[in-house]
Structures are given as structure tokens and as C-alpha cells.
Amino acid sequence: MAFYLTKPIKIPLEQDVGDVRQKLANLLKIKAEQIASFHLHKQSVDARNKSDVHFVCSYVVETSRKPHNATAYEQPQDVLQQATKLQTEASCVVVGAGPAGLFAALYLVKCGMRVTVVERGSDVSERKAKVDDYFNGGQFDENCNVQFGLGGAGTFSDGKLTTGISSPLTYTVFQQLVRSGAPREILTDALPHVGTDKLVNVVANLRDEIIGYGGKFLFDRTVTDFIFEYGVAKGVVLDGNERLFADSVLLACGHSARDLFSCLNRRGVDVTFKPFAVGLRIEHSREFINEAQYGKLFATHKDLPSASYKLAYNGAMHSCYSFCMCPGGVVVAANSERDTVVVNGMSNYLRNAQNSNSAIVVNVTAEDVAKFGYGTDALSGVRFQQDMERKAYLFAGDYVAPCQNVTDFIANRVSGKFDLTPSYPRGVKSVNLRELLPAEICDTICQALEVFEGKIKGFGSSGVLTGVESRTSSPVRIVRDATFQSNVRGLYPTGEGAGYAGGIVSSAVDGLKVAMAICKAYE
């Protein structure tokens, strides 16, 4: 017997995707009884023809016959299941409990290393309570918010698991997420997501598994400095001047740990500017997006998920694209510093909120940031982000988000009445968002909206924009070599904050890669 991956086949919406033995036999040109087993590999929606929206599915088939319309399939390895205990007493401090830190810590403890995870935010239940309170008008906590706390920034987003990387370690990440309580559908959906409501339990289970293998967590503790001796990392300094020593430091601090970027830069660690993107978050009604993507006939079909989109525009000076699309979601307050406003998107698993949203962002280079007047050093992008976020706060005040109709943004005028009810939890104020971002960023967004209107009719002529979307990715890269170490030996920059990942899956994969490299040194 051998396993084969089939070519995609069309499955009508109301058909059971598991009841396809004969259809597979016809595709493979073998008899149905010659299929020993099969399971769904990937499932996506084909809505190109609005009169015939259907699923497209591929399958892994076990058979003794070499079939047509299929290729040999070998299941990837699950490195977390195969991790072997090393004969070592080595220790590691993991800074940050986002996807990179959690997956790295889990691999390290399964290999027998002594691991302490330091997280400036709170454990997940307390974190959720603080975030909910802030959304409802309560106090802002600069150490525990949408950016900081167990699970990292991705916990209060959509739990999106789409990724552009092709690493075989993605298999391990998905399998572990399911073991930790994520829906099994993430293994087969072409656009998998967990949802914030489910992700809080997933990260709690990951935490418990790490503790079960002997790992420790220090919540509500901030790393204020690093212990370097003769060019080698020996640990970290915590608030209160407590020193925590270790044989290595895995830095998975996330893209908003600006104080650590500054500290590393000051201490001689090689930190450079990294391009990122900034812009606004656009909202339309979920009903509008569903109808635009599926057509009127299928817009409300019970078997179809809330519709998503992916849009891109390449201008003469800048590119502009949709990012972090949240079907049936809300716009959330994602600032991590006082007296600033930052927006992001969030969806629960069912994606059934009234609106759908996504970021509409423009790429920013080092040359752009210098031209905007923020300098040419490694932290120039950080200063640019901070300035926009402070302006957004001053525009509206009291953590209220500046907002504008799409049509009014294009026309360069303040909105009198919003086209739909903005979902930002702390309320919005009508302002001219053109005054928030540099002119060429705004011009690029306007050009892109015109192009997007041609792709989705009504997209660029309806809806609202809320600002500012500034945390798309890290504005710095903490340089590392082929061994994943910085110019300070024993310091391992990891994940999105270090500039080597973007999103939950790629961050988790990077955490695994770095952890495997650390363990390899002790084999």
C-alpha cells in the first residue's frame, strides 16, 4: 500500500465531503474497492462562477495501485511528537509567550531543558478580563493588552493560520494546535482560523503542557535589560532589578516590545530597520462582502463561511494591499502605549458579527521613513509608528478612534454621518484621516481603493475607515546568523518581533527552528 495526494475535485455545497469514494475512484481510474482508505486533505470554496459556487477538495488516498491524477504523498514529521530527551542540565530563558515563545518552550522542555518563560502581560484569563474591561471603557494597562500577555498579539485577532511559508514544520504547528484544543477543521481548511474565543483556551492548554514537562512561567514580569558577559548572553534583568541567569536567552518579544528594541540597540546588539506597512482599517457589512464574493444566490448559504477577500495594488511609488482580513469581525483597540490609538481586527470562530473588516496598508521603506523626517537609524520606524499613534489619539481623545467614510476619505472631507456603524469598541470620532498619515500614503490608499472598486463593486465607494493600523509587522530586525544567534552569543532572536516571521504559524515555526538549533548544540 502507498499514499497518494489527488488533484482537486469539485464537490457540491450540500454533499458530504467524506462521501466521495466512487468519485475518487473515477478520478484515479481505479475500482472503489481498491481504495483502502482516504481522508480530506484540503478544502476551499470556488466562487468564481456566482451561479455555481462549490467546494474544491483534494484527498490523501491509500491504495496498492498506482493511480492517475495523483502524486505520491509522504506525511510530514511531527517534530514535537518525536522530540527526544537530551542528557543536559542546560537552561533557557524564553522572553515572550506568543506563538514563537510557546512553541519554542514546548520543544525545549520536551528535550529536557530547564525553561523559564517571562511574559510582561498576564496569564490568559486575567489578560482577557483586562482587555474586555478596556474595550468597555475601562482603564488601559500598558503591560497587559491586545499586544502583551499569554498568547501574544495573535490571541486577540482572528486566530488566522494562513501563511506564505512552505516549511514542513507547519505540519507540527497545526497538529499541536489541534492537540491543544483548536478545531480539527484547521487541518483541512484552505483558509484556516481558530477565532479569539477558542484561541484563549488553546494557549492555556499549551501553557499547561509546558508546565507539565517542567517549564515555568513568570507572568506580569518585564525584562528591563540583558546580562551580557564578554559577548555572551547569560540571562535577563527583570523589573525590580532581579537577575535571572540561564545558558541561553531566546528572545520572542513580539513586534510591539519597543523598549526592548531600544535596550538591545543601546547594548550593542545588531539591530536594523525592517520595512513594514501602515494604513487604515476598512469596514463593510458582512452581508455586502458575502454577496460580493458569493453572489446573491449563495450569499446566505448555510454551508459557506463568512466571505473573505485578498486585494493588492502596485503603484508607481508604493504598493497597497489588504491585510489581516476578518470576516464577520470587529475592529479592536490594539495600542500598547498610553495616549495612543492603534486599530486591529478580531473575529470569533463563527465569524458572525455584523461587519467584516481588513487593514488597507501601504509598504514603508527606510527611505520613506527618512523622507518623512524620522531619521535613518535602526529605530526610525518605531518613531514613525509612535508619532502616528499619538496623532490618532490627539485627533479623537480618550482612546476614541478617528473614523471617516471611504467616500469622504477619497474626497478629502470630514464625514457628517457614517455609512455604517463602526465596530471599534471605545467609540469613534469623525475626522479627516488624510491629516493623520503622510500625503503619499493617503494618495496610494485612494488609488488602491479605486482599483479595488473595480475588483469588488462597492468596495471603494462604501464603508468606513478607522485609524491607525500601524502594527502590521516589526519595524526592526534583530540580526542573527546561520546558528540563529545574534552578534551576542547565546542570544537567539526569534519570531515576528525579531523580524523573522509574520503571523501565528510562521512565528510558531520560527520558534521551533530556533529551539531545535539550541537543542542540537547539546546533542
Image (cartoon, grey):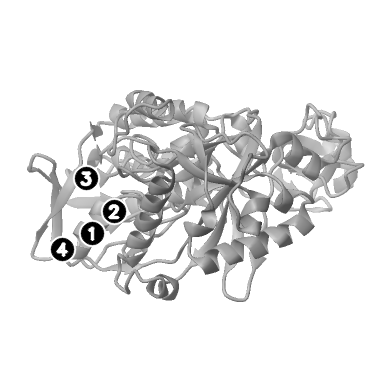
Mark 3 vs mark 4: give the one in front: 4
User: In the rendered image, which quarter is residue 15 located in?
Assistant: top right
Label 4 sits on residue: 267
Rendered residue at 43%/52% (across/down):
471
Q: How crowded is mark 1: few (under 14 residues within 10 Å), some or many (20 or more)?
A: some
> What residue did someone put label 2 on?
258
Foreground mark, 2 or 3?
Answer: 2
Q: What element carries label 3?
A: strand
Left of 258 or right of it: where is 392?
A: right
Q: What residue type is labelled 1?
A: Ser
Seen in the picture, residue 488 relative to 194 is either above or below; the reply is: below
For marks 3 and 1 on the same chain, the one whose residue lies earlier in the sequence: 3
Q: Where is residue 327 in the image (x, y as percent from the top left)?
A: 64, 38
- Identify the mark at residue 262; answer none if there is no mark: 1
* Element under disc 2: helix
Pinpoint residue 256: horizontal percent, then vertical percent. 34, 50
Three-letter code for the amino acid on which mark 2 is drawn: Arg
Snapshot quadrant of residue 10? top right
Name the secondary structure under disc 1.
helix
Q: Distance between the residues labelled 2 and 3?
A: 19 Å
